[in-house]
Image: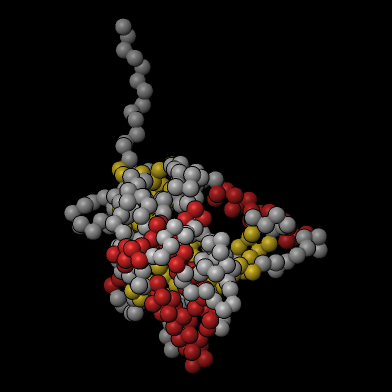
Amino acid sequence: MKIIVDKVSMKFWGGRPTRGRFFVARSREWRGLWRSRRRRPWLLAIEILILLLLGLGAVRGAIAVAPEAPSPESLSPGAYRLPIAAVHPLPPSLAAWRDRAIAPADHYLDLIEPSIAGPLLWTRFPIRVALDFGEDINSPPPSEQARRDRWTQAIRHAIADWSPYLPLTLIESPTDPEASTPDITFRYQAPPLRLDRANPSGIRPIAAAGRATYRLVPIPDPDPRQPIPRLGHRCEIFLTPGRPDPQLLDTARHELGHALGLWGHSDRPTDLMYFRPSNPPNPIRDRDLNTLALLYQQPTHLGWPLQPNPSPDPPNRPAPPP
Ligand SMILES: [Zn+2]
């Protein structure tokens, strides 16, 4: 079920209208699996069909908030509008960074892409991270177990790297009561292929080593007496297993940067959030942290109570005779 909250058009601090942006994915990509449309004309037909389907999805102007199970409330379609945007308190760990930053004006906030909900900030801490190995979680063969351990280790390392700036915690057990609603989920699989619509030289499927996506969800108010949910979000990170350790860590750290709010790419190749991986991998740089600290000082619709929609206007009645 999808909950349509409202139709909105808003401006972000960068000034671009953000109508209809709902699902966003960021990845570092390697491109060009297929070069020639002429040799494979049937591919072109399939691509045009997929593009048409993607295009239909892109013109939707409403916010669809997919409730989680169990749904916090029985939301009815059209019942809610976006919360009013406001600034949340800066997390103390980011405030500490801001206060000791050497060159706080050196950032790339203007390259962070807008979302329909405003900056995609976390407002409850610690941010809870889960790992999802798919259906087959029990007693894999030793080689597969070693692969999973390396994958898990890379994520632990990435979490440890970001934790001094935003508190993160890894949900260790699937029986943890919090495990059903993690904030960020790492998936033990390669990102699904997708089409590169921005490439002027042709439409190509893109493969990626990692990809972060988000969705908007209603989340229960921390005060159980409040019946109206708040606007929240959840992130999913596909992280391709089986790659060398340095690349695994680099991708996990970079995609986690997106999930923490940096939904865009730095223009400087030495930053962690540059769009292309570097060799050796970049650590989290001052510019990444300056941008993150600034981002968390922006007003956002996330984390505030959804606005009940007024009931629709009564139908027009004919004016009474004079
Ligand atoms: Zn990226």
Q: Identify which residue is drawn at 36% across, 55% down.
A: 297
Q: Toward the viewer: 252 or 208?
A: 252
**In the shown orientation, is residue 54 left or right of residue 68?**
right
Q: Nearer the viewer, residue 135 or 303?
A: 303
Q: Which residue lies at the image location 31% right of the left edge and 77% below the top edge?
A: 175
Residue 60 against residue 216 in the figure, above or below: above
> In which quadrant is the N terminus drawn?
bottom left
Instruction: Give 43 or 185, whichever is nearer the viewer.
Output: 185
Q: Residue furthest left?
A: 225
- In the rendered view, tell whether residue 13 sits above or below residue 176: above
Between residue 142 and residue 82, name the one nearer to us.
Answer: 82
Look at the image and tell me whether residue 67 can be seen: no
Residue 291 location, quadrant = bottom left
**Residue visible at 41% across and 51% down in the picture:** 118
Q: Position of residue 124 (x, y in %)?
A: 30, 62
For the C terminus, the quadrant is top left
| Residue 17 visible to an observer of this rendering | yes
Q: As drawn, is 162 to the left or to the right of 16? A: left
Q: Residue at x 32, y 66 (%)?
A: 96
Query: Quarter-wise, where is residue 152 in the image?
Result: bottom left
Tell me where residue 210 appears, x and y as whole percent.
54, 71
Give the residue at the far top of this rendering: 322
Q: Quadrant of residue 89?
A: bottom left
